[in-house]
Image: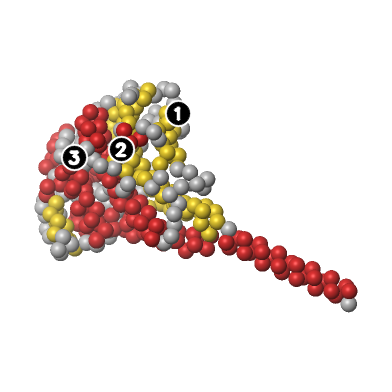
């Protein structure tokens, strides 16, 4: 009887220990991540200080949000809503989803704000250069001259009541590569907040949105990419919470021919890459869609005009890095910015 009692005690103890381990596993909070490849880039979303059961429920939904936006706004997918709009250029208006209508509407707003430095009608030019793909090339001057008249956001006709998009000229082509990731990051952040997530990192191919605090309950420290081609280390850090951080730089995608480098940020007015003294522009904003659209257009405006433009936009800050290694930051970042590389000089 004593032996049986000991066995029963051991079995009971094992059951209780197993239950405790399972309970701790189920209820223990940690960081859970998911990675995918949509929107022509690697995306990673990390949920912080959350239970695994909740993460297992939310992360597949996040994946679906990215996939749906990819299927709506991809330039490469023949069946995407964007492709349908482009195929019907000069023919008829196309009824679209709320998502893509809102993105195009916001794009037109930023085109007006920057006097056309940001223009989603740049599609004929990006297709001509194809920078970032293996068949990238430097087009002839006549080729560029032929497509430039098609690059004009003023020929995008939006009907909000009918939710339609019409491109006035045949051959026009919209390219949402400069704004879709920002819209997607905002949509993910909204979904997570609505489902009780307080802390997260959304990284869509370098477009970063940080929600709440890090795993040490402090503001996130986000590295600013060193524009030097041979560097993989950040040149600075910024401390942020509930902010979007988007960088556009000439080091990201480029084509080199006959010793000359042609970067991917094309001037919609000339058809050639923007030519100024900037290496990169980083936008820090509440909404990632704003940061996405502004990072390229502010780069196009150059240091002086771009800096003044950012100062005029409420809730938006920027970091400008010049080709001669000077760093300019707007006032809202002065207490949160840390320079890490003495090759660079912070200009007051």
Quarter of the image containing the N terminus? bottom right
Q: Is residue 69 above or below residue 6?
A: above
One can see residue 263 in this view: yes
Q: Secondary structure at mark 1?
A: loop
Quarter of the image containing the C terminus? top left
**Is 348 left, or right, of 169 in this rendering?**
right
Q: Is residue 26 above or below residue 326?
A: below
Reading the image, the residue beneath label 2 is 317
52 and 199: which one is in front? 199
How many callouts does the rendering have?
A: 3
> Marks 3 and 2, Cα distance to the nearest angstrom?
16 Å
Q: Position of residue 342 (x, y in %)?
A: 43, 23
329 and 98: which one is in front? 329
- Sequence-first disc among 2 and 1: 2
Q: Position of residue 122 (x, y in %)?
A: 20, 44
**Is 184 left, or right, of 220 in this rendering?**
left
Q: Residue at x 13, y 59 (%)?
A: 159
Reading the image, the residue beneath label 1 is 340
């Amino acid at each position: 009887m004593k032996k049986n009692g000991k066995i029963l005690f051991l079995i009971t103890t094992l059951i209780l220990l197993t239950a405790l381990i399972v309970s701790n596993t189920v209820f223990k909070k940690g960081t859970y991540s998911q990675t995918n490849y949509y929107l022509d880039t690697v995306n990673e979303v990390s949920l912080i200080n959350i239970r695994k059961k909740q993460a297992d429920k939310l992360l597949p939904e996040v994946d679906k949000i990215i996939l749906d936006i990819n299927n709506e706004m991809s330039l490469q997918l023949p069946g995407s809503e964007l492709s349908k709009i482009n195929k019907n250029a000069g023919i008829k208006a196309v009824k679209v989803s709320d998502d893509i209508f809102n993105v195009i509407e916001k794009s037109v707003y930023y085109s007006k704000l920057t006097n056309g430095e940001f223009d989603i009608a740049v599609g004929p030019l990006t297709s001509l250069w194809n920078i970032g793909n293996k068949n990238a090339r430097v087009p002839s001057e006549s080729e560029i001259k032929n497509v430039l008249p098609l690059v004009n956001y003023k020929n995008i006709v939006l009907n909000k009541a009918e939710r339609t998009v019409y491109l006035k000229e045949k051959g026009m082509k919209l390219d949402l590569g400069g704004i879709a990731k920002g819209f997607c990051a905002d949509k993910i952040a909204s979904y997570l907040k609505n489902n009780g997530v307080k802390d997260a990192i959304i990284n869509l191919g370098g477009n970063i949105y940080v929600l709440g605090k890090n795993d040490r309950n402090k503001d996130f420290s986000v590295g600013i990419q060193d524009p030097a081609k041979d560097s993989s280390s950040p040149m600075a850090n910024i401390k942020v919470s509930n902010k979007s951080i988007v960088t556009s730089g000439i080091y990201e995608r480029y084509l080199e021919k006959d010793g000359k480098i042609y970067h991917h940020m094309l001037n919609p007015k000339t058809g050639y890459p923007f030519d100024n003294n900037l290496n990169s522009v980083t936008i820090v904003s509440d909404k990632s869609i704003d940061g996405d659209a502004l990072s390229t257009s502010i780069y196009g405006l150059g240091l002086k005009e771009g800096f003044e433009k950012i100062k005029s936009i409420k809730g938006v800050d920027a970091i400008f890095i010049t080709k001669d290694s000077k760093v300019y930051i707007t006032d809202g970042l002065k207490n949160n910015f840390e320079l890490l590389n003495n090759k660079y000089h912070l200009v007051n």
